[in-house]
Amino acid sequence: MNRINEKFAELKQKQEKGLIGFIMAGQPDFQTGVDCARTLEDAGCDILEIGVPYSDPIADGDVIEKAHFKGVEQGMNMSQALEFMSAIRDKCALPLVMFSYFNPIFRRGMPKFVQELKSAGGSAAIIPDIPLEERVRYESDDLDIIPMLAPSSNADRISQTDKAARSFIYCVSVAGVTGIRNQLPDLQDYLQRVRANTTHPLAVGFGISSPEQIIALKDYVDALVVGSVLVKTIEQYAEEKTLLFRELNNTMSSLKKAAR
């Protein structure tokens, strides 16, 4: 089993839900970003997604989109993102997932990317703009590509996604983009439908940013993904490191408390 499978097995044994955090590679700067990852781990984060800045982040809302553009302006690319992941692996025991749009991977070459991701300590990749039908062209025994499901998915689509999954399935909460949302749609029927047609652990993300939302959803999934609220905190306190680590700790701790 890879680190992600081991983490879900551990969470199941402890009878608690996992929290999957998201940060953008190299932000607010390389070393502080690594320290942010360590802070999140200490506060209860179970799995960490590391985003690769990209110029056309079609699945992301305002907060993470801004972080993408800032990273591109700073010259952060796939090579540096892999170095960032490796630096986090040296400091943290968290399972690490790389979130990248497909173009940077395609330009690098999938075989090279797979080996470099493994060398950097990554356990999987999320590639939101690869359709399920295209995965077969790029799948590798050495790469776990986390599949994503939309609320509109029918039973056949859900079953196909389950066959493609290795560690877990990412259930998108809305037919839209990432972002902090005060209200989420009623997801009970959707998540129960996915559960009925899958065998893998389920994570739900896009818009989750409060303990109340986690409490409302945790009975239907195995993990919850929080991203925009963490990225926004990093941006807000980038120049005040003590406040940054305190606020990240407080945010993640309160979310993890809700997940237990």
Image (tube, rainbow, N blue to C red):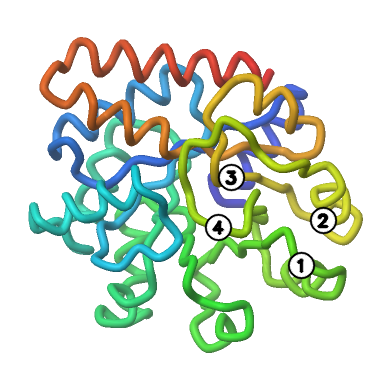
* Along the line of sight, the residue nearer the viewer: 246 or 44: 246
Q: Earlier in the sequence, mark 3 or mark 4?
A: 4
Q: Earlier in the sequence, mark 1 or mark 4?
A: 1
Where does label 4 land, which residue? 176
**Residue under the point 40% across and 53% down:** 122
**Secondary structure beneath label 2:** helix
Numbered badge on residue 64:
none
Horizontal side of 22 relative to 147 (left or right) equals left
Spatial CA distance of label 3 from label 1 is 15 Å
Q: Earlier in the sequence, mark 2 or mark 4?
A: 4
Numbered badge on residue 205:
3
Spatial CA distance of label 1 from label 2 is 9 Å
Residue type beneath disc 2: Val
Q: Tell me, yes or no, whether the two marked residues, 2 and 4, touch with CB atoms within 8 Å.
A: no
* Along the line of sight, the residue nearer the viewer: 242 or 229: 229
Where does label 2 land, which residue? 194
**Residue under the point 19% across and 11% down:** 242
Instruction: Mark 3: give few (<14), some (14-19) or many (20+) Cα within 10 Å.
Output: some
Q: Earlier in the sequence, mark 1 or mark 2?
A: 1
Instruction: Mark 4: give few (<14), some (14-19) or many (20+) Cα within 10 Å.
Output: some
**Residue under the point 35% across and 63% down:** 57
* Along the line of sight, the residue nearer the viewer: 36 or 14: 36
Residue type beneath disc 3: Gly
Q: Nearer the viewer, mark 1 or mark 2?
A: 1
Q: Tell me, yes or no, whether the two marked residues, 1 and 2, touch with CB atoms within 8 Å.
A: yes
For the C terminus, the image quarter is top right
Residue type beneath disc 4: Gly
Where does label 1 land, which residue? 153
Horizontal side of 177 relative to 196 (left or right) equals left
Spatial CA distance of label 1 from label 4 is 14 Å
Q: Nearer the viewer, mark 3 or mark 4?
A: 4
Q: Earlier in the sequence, mark 3 or mark 2?
A: 2
